[in-house]
């Protein structure tokens, strides 16, 4: 019984750690994309202004795909 509980706690810890790391990676990616956006000097159709907003999750930006694995 004690081994099963220890295994459960270890699994729970791994799942929580994975969630925190994913959020950190998304934040880092969003900051990198916003930095790239700031360097673009011509956006005549305001595509990036309308779809890449810091107020919106990076996963909802046009052209950005979020997932646990990169292609």
Image: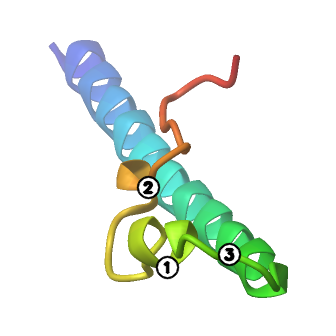
Q: Residue at x 43, y 55 (%)?
A: 61
Instruction: Determine contact: label 1, label 3, CB under 8 Å.
Output: yes
| SS label for mark 3 | loop
Which of marks 3 and 1 precedes in the sequence? Answer: 3
Q: Residue at x 48, y 69 (%)?
A: 52
Screen quadrant of the C terminus: top right
- Dot label at residue 69: none
- Dot label at residue 49: 1
Gap between marks 1 and 3 measured at Cα: 8 Å
| SS label for mark 2 | loop
Residue 62 point in image, percent of width and height: 46, 49
Residue 54 point in image, percent of width and height: 44, 81
Query: Residue 10 appears in which quarter of the rendering?
Result: top left
Which of marks 2 and 1 precedes in the sequence? Answer: 1
As rendered, which of 7 and 20 lies closer to the eye? Answer: 20
Q: Which numbered mark, 3 or 2, is in the foreground of this view?
A: 3
| Residue position marked by numbered label 3 in the rendering | 43
Q: Which numbered mark, 1 or 2, is in the foreground of this view?
A: 1
Residue 37 point in image, percent of width and height: 71, 76
Screen quadrant of the N terminus: top left
| Residue position marked by numbered label 2 in the rendering | 61
Residue 30 point in image, percent of width and height: 59, 67
């Amino acid at each position: 019984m004690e081994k099963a509980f220890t295994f459960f706690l270890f699994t729970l810890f791994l799942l929580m750690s994975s969630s925190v790391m994913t959020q950190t990676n998304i934040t880092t990616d969003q900051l990198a994309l916003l930095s790239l956006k700031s360097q673009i000097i011509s956006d005549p159709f305001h595509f990036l202004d309308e779809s890449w907003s810091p107020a919106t999750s990076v996963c909802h930006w046009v052209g950005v795909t979020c997932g646990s694995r990169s292609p």
